[in-house]
Image (cartoon, grey):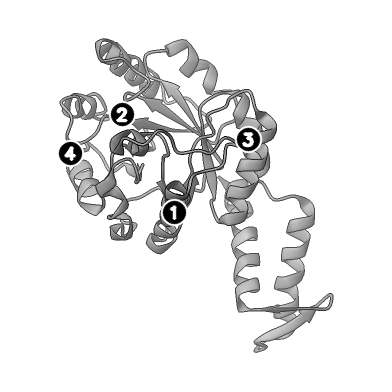
Amino acid sequence: MTWRSLLFVPGDRPERMEKALGLGADALILDLEDSVAPAAKPAARDAVRSLLERAPAGPALLVRVNPVASEAFATDIAALAGAPLTGVVLPKAEGRATVVALREALPGDYAVLPIATETPRAVFALGDYDGAGLAGLTWGAEDLPAAIGALGSREADGGYTDPYKMVRALALFAAHAAGVPAIETVYPDVRDLDGLAAYAARGRRDGFAGMMAIHPAQVAVINAAFTPDEAELAAARRVVALFEANPGAGALQLDGRMVDAPHLAAARRLLGAVTERAGG
């Protein structure tokens, strides 16, 4: 299943997790890492476990654990034993070896969503993912600049500086090379919904399949950006129908423009994603 919106919710806020179930996000990321202070982590594990055990209907439920190399990791994993969750979000991922280490420790066959660009070493491991056991691949623009002593990752207009444009592109291609959905990173200005809409639209244009959110108000905007409208669907159906009517053709004309195998593949991918979501 490809998720359009993945909403972070602090694990130590049970009332927010409960409310988030009805906000329309395709997936919730119940957080045990950055949004939870060290002293609050035990209570957060209990609250997340309590929610998971109820197996509520609605969005897919993922848990962001602490990094594999951290002291909190083993306790996080123990808290998930037997829990009916969809997957685990892996922070500070550094290639396939980190995913393998997580999967060997997990008390179940849960899908993994690595956040794959949070350390300098991680950037050089982006081509290492093979897709095994992955729910997708995502990236971040907050931890990496802090790790290298950069003053930030964005220009004054909100666009990324050159190093992070590169990292975003590499993460996008790494996901597709691994055969899994590419998930766009968060948009930090929770009040700027117009900016979010433009950012999410660029993400979908560039090849991302969905996007993470950090505030409930962002969910509807992200869902809209990653949902094709009827005009897109109609155009895709016409491309597919054209090739079905001309079996064996390599390139055809539609409304005066050439369409060929990449256009057909894109049309089928679009229609397939919509069918999958309707069935999921």
Residue behind mark 1: 166
User: Given contact means CB atoms under 8 Å apart, are the residues at marks 4 and 2 in contact?
Assistant: no
Going by the image, does 21 lie left or right of 35? right
Compare residues 65 and 133 and report the one nearer the observer: 65
Q: What residue is drawn where x is 34% and y is 39%?
A: 144
In which image quadrant can residue 200 be found? top right
| Viewer-side label of 1, 4 | 1
Residue behind mark 3: 196
Give the CA distance from mark 1 to mark 4.
32 Å
Q: Locate residue 69, reporting x and y percent.
A: 17, 35
Amino acid marked by disc 3 = Leu
Q: In the displayed image of the protein, which residue is found farthest to the right?
A: 255
Q: Locate residue 239, reporting x and y percent.
A: 73, 72
| Viewer-side label of 1, 3 | 1
Q: Locate residue 110, reporting x and y percent.
A: 31, 41
Give the CA distance from mark 3 to mark 4.
36 Å
